[in-house]
Image (tube, coloured by chain):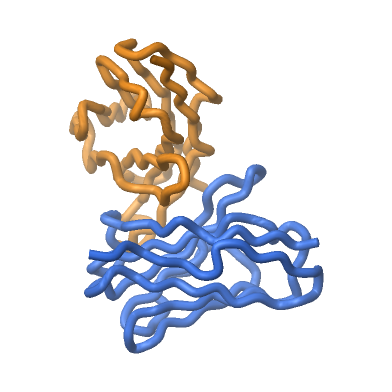
Chain colours: A orange, B blue
Amino acid sequence: GDSVTQMEGPVTLSEEAFLTINCTYTATGYPSLFWYVQYPGEGLQLLLKATKADDKGSNKGFEATYRKETTSFHLEKGSVQVSDSAVYFCALSDLETSGGSYIPTFGRGTSLIVHP
Amino acid sequence: KAGVTQTPRYLIKTRGQQVTLSCSPISGHRSVSWYQQTPGQGLQFLFEYFSETQRNKGNFPGRFSGRQFSNSRSEMNVSTLELGDSALYLCASSLAASSYEQYFGPGTRLTVT
């Protein structure tokens, strides 16, 4: 079945450092890819998405590019802030194999801690 | 606009009991999805309801069920609780069915003893 693998956390960075959180996936079809963020005490929220190869999703300074050849969707940010401290989830949904329905498969999540 | 609300926020039950969790979606949203989050299995899709009909179901046993009311509020029920059902149960709402534009609630933390 489909699966998503994320790097283990926590990732600890100083403010203004460059961030990369790795995400790779396995899917039988051609999935859409997503990053969600969960801030402390809050529910998940969609951060960005990409629906086809070479698409770049971006939001709030975060970016991720859909790389079909390496089955990856790594999350990056050029300069992190303390307010970016959260848990980040990579997810996929294969609309083709699910009959057009959004049935997400999530990674385990990566905790990011940013120090001042 | 009020966000997704879930009640109760915390719950402790005994093995063998049953439990009902409630979710009120954002006003105007007609789709409600439920997820289970555990340290062992991560975040897993349970089911989705739209216009009072279950549209999709994840790979969970029949002890997990849900329903949606005409005002789009949803409940999920777990019967014959097992220790492994201890988890954070998240609800998410969206305007349309099968949408990735979901807004999540803070969750209900269920502990089974």
Image quadrant assignment for residue A21 = top left
Residue B107 % position (x, y): 50, 58
In terms of depth relative to the viewer, which is nearer, B13 or A98? B13
Lateral position of residue B42 relative to residue B72, left or right: right
Q: Quadrant of the C terminus of chain A?
A: top left
Q: Residue furthest front?
A: A116
Residue A11 % position (x, y): 49, 20
Lateral position of residue B40 relative to residue A2, left or right: right
In terms of depth relative to the viewer, which is nearer, B64 or B88? B88
Image quadrant assignment for residue A66 = top left
Residue A52 shows in the view: yes
Residue placed at 61% from the left, 72% from the top? B64
Residue placed at 33% from the left, 48% from the top? A45
Residue B96 % position (x, y): 24, 68
Residue placed at 31% from the left, 82% from the top? B51
Residue B62 shows in the view: no
Look at the picture and state if B77 lies above or below B41: below
Look at the picture and state if B45 lies above or below B51: above
Residue A26 % position (x, y): 45, 37
Q: How many marks?
A: 0
Look at the picture and state if B46 lies above or below A86: below
In terms of depth relative to the viewer, which is nearer, B91 or A66? B91
Lateral position of residue A66 relative to residue A116, left or right: left
Residue placed at 28% from the left, 75% from the top? B30
